[in-house]
Image (tube, rainbow, N blue to C red):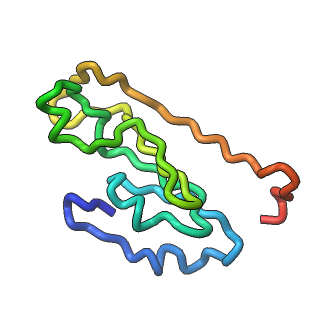
Amino acid sequence: EDLEEARSSDLRAARRDVLPNDLQVVLCHNPGGADALAGPGVLAVLSGHSHGHQLDLPVVRRLAPEHPGDRRQLGPTVAITSRGLGALGVPLRLRSPAELVVVDLVAAPGEDADAR
């Protein structure tokens, strides 16, 4: 799904085989879609897209999404937006280090991880 290119996914079809007690980790290119994807059963929404303000300059920063390299809590769902490794157009990053995010999923204390 890409909100900027007006491409959407059939979320109902994508979730067809998800069982009621399954936890979901959702990938969404544009972090602006996290609000619509968050909810019960969705552990996390992982996004990128913003290139971490590839050129982090005051004038350019106002044009970019406000949430690169951010972690937001959306009810029961955590939304993580990575600064990413790439660049858009010119292969240059200024005052915006590349970022590789590692997410460890661990069962809560007392929860049987094999039961899911």
Q: Is residue 90 above or below residue 73?
A: above
Q: Quadrant of the N terminus?
A: bottom left
Q: Is residue 106 above or below residue 44?
A: above
> What residue is at 49 percent from the left and 64 percent from the top?
38
Between 6 and 62, the one lying in front of the other is 62
The residue lying furthest to the top in this view is 95
Q: Quadrant of the C terminus?
A: bottom right
Q: Residue at x 84, y 49 (%)?
A: 109
Q: Nearer the viewer, residue 27 or 68?
A: 68
**Residue at left 40%, top 67%?**
36
Q: Position of residue 97 (x, y in %)?
A: 35, 22
Q: Is residue 67 above or below residue 95?
A: below
Please provide percent x and percent y for residue 46.
47, 50
Q: Position of residue 73 (x, y in %)?
A: 51, 51
Find residue 3 and report its image quarter.
Answer: bottom left
Would residue 54 be found to the left or right of residue 68 on screen?
left
Q: How many marks?
A: 0
Residue 81, quarter of picture: top left
Left or right side of 57 for 104: right
Viewer-nearest residue: 26 or 43: 43
| Residue 82 rendering spot, x and y as whole percentages | 42, 39
Q: Residue at x 62, y 67 (%)?
A: 41
